Amino acid sequence: MKTVLLSAAVSLFLALFGTPFAIKVFTRRGLGQEIRSDGPAHMSKRGTPTMGGTVIIMASLAGYLVGHLATGDAMSPSGLLVLFLMTGLGLVGFADDFIKLYMQRSLGLRAGAKLAGQAIVGGIFALLAIRFPDGYDITPASTHLSFIATFGPPIGTVFFVVWVILMVADVQRREPHRRAGRPCHRRGDPRAGRLHDHRDLAAPQRLHGLPGSGLL
């Protein structure tokens, strides 16, 4: 418990004080959002600093490291895997912002390249999550399909990897719409027009009833 509290405190401190500093640095250097030239709808976003998520990721990594070094607790495979997933997807986002800033292209990465990056990160995460058993031979995630318990019929490694990639891609697809306050359903969806809230975004991340329910 001490490790968790210390890690959270360090991460929160670095994020709270590092984010305003990073925004000032990005603003001074002109690292702001480019906009599309097809209309005035996005004019208000011009110059908005990008790559702010870098500070949060670095704060999380530093907090996890400091917390475990200070208390002497061993780093768990589950914790390292979550940090890997966060950092990997963060790198995809960093590449997206980098292209926006240095190539002056408001759309950043092409949809196919972004999806490929997310699939690679999610696939590696899924493959590693079903390894590294602990003393009770329990791995961070499981390929068994479970609904009300931690056991059930196995779906196999391939389907588990595909399942994780789909969850990762879906969450990443929803995130830009959630930040912008726009619906993200396809045309014809009965839910179209309804804005997502935090429960919609978190739904794919609930592990109970999904393969790999023992991940966290």
Image (cartoon, rainbow, N blue to C red):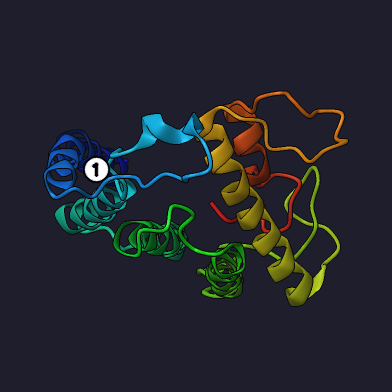
Residue 129 image position (x, y, % from top left): 56, 68
Residue 109 image position (x, y, % from top left): 49, 63
| Disc 1 target residue | 11
Residue 25 image position (x, y, % from top left): 12, 45
Q: Name the residue: 56% across, 33% down.
A: 178
Q: Nearer the viewer, residue 176 or 206?
A: 176
Drawn side of residue 161 relative to residue 171, left or right: right
Give the quadrant of residue 153: bottom right
Drawn side of residue 63 relative to residue 140, left or right: left
Residue density around tag 1, few if under 14, some if 14–19, many if 20 or more, within 10 Å: many
**Viewport quadrant of the N terminus:** top left
Q: Name the residue: 34% across, 45% down.
A: 33
Q: Name the residue: 14% across, 35% down.
A: 17
Q: Nearer the viewer, residue 49 or 57?
A: 49
Type of amino acid under label 1? Ser
Q: Name the residue: 20% across, 33% down.
A: 16
Badge count: 1
Q: Secondary structure at mark 1?
A: helix
Give the quadrant of residue 79: bottom left
